[in-house]
Image (cartoon, rainbow, N blue to C red):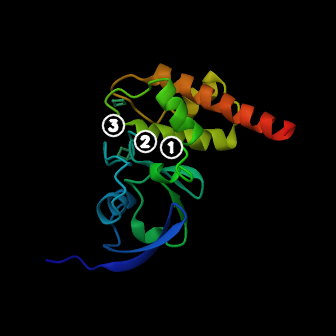
Amino acid sequence: MELPMTRITLNVNGAETQVDAPDDMPLLWALRDLMGLTGSKYGCGIGQCGACTVHLNGAPVRSCLIPVSQLSGQAITTIEGLTEDGALHPLQQAWIEKDVAQCGYCQSGQIMSAAALLQRNAEPTDADIDAAMAGNYCRCGTYIRIREAIHAAAMSFDAAATKGVQS
Ligand code: FES
Ligand code: FES
């Protein structure tokens, strides 16, 4: 039996895209299977691991939990949308410099949660980072390097802002 499909207009990474999907399809599957955006990962499917984290109107959400039919007209950002004009986001750069990833599976979710943190708190403490990242699990135990990379990215944001003021 074929499931009834609804045409839904999604705003993903600044571009509007139409998808035909069952109303209850989780956003994660629309991103991965219908739009080819495979950076967001399926870990648990029940909102517990954070591997599927994307931004909805700037806030981190679990894309495995949200039906795509609820998202018309809302701004969705995925890991693919963090890169601007080919330039890596400071967090992505810091992730490389600190050699954070091990298997890598959890890391796009980690970076999306970190990006949301830095948007609301430009100079997070260790405690701030631990609180913001508590819902993102890493089976490889990269938590210490994740914390270092978030501090490094925060410093690079700070340096860029200082340079902007001086120039
Ligand atoms: Fe969404 Fe685990 S796959 S929270
Ligand atoms: Fe392997 Fe996080 S790097 S699960």
Residue 15 spot, x, y in % from top left: 51, 68
Residue 164 spot, x, y in % from top left: 80, 41
What amino acid is found at the position of numbered circle 3 in the picture?
Answer: Tyr
Q: Residues within 10 Å of mark 3 (few under 14, many from 20)?
A: some
Q: Is mark 3 within 8 Å of ligand 2?
A: yes
Residue tagged 1: 112
Q: Quadrant of ligand 2?
A: top left
Mark 2–mark 1 CB contact (< 8 Å):
yes
What amino acid is found at the position of numbered circle 1 in the picture?
Answer: Met
Number of numbered discs overlaid on the protein picture: 3
Residue 3 spot, x, y in % from top left: 22, 76
Q: Is residue 121 left or right of residue 83?
A: right
Residue 108 spot, x, y in % from top left: 43, 41
Looking at this view, name the residue that lies furthest to the left: 1
Q: CA distance from mark 3 to mark 2?
A: 7 Å
Say if 160 sits above or below 139 in the image. below
On the rendered image, what quadrant is the C terminus found in?
Answer: top right
Residue tagged 2: 108
Residue tagged 3: 105
Say if 81 sits above or below 49 in the image. below
Mark 3–mark 2 CB contact (< 8 Å):
no
Looking at this view, name the residue that lies furthest to the right: 166
Q: Earlier in the sequence, mark 3 or mark 1?
A: 3
Dot 1 falls on a residue whose secondary structure is: helix
Mark 3–mark 1 CB contact (< 8 Å):
no
Q: CA distance from mark 3 to mark 1?
A: 13 Å
Q: Is mark 2 within 8 Å of ligand 2?
A: no
On the rendered image, what quadrant is the N terminus found in?
Answer: bottom left
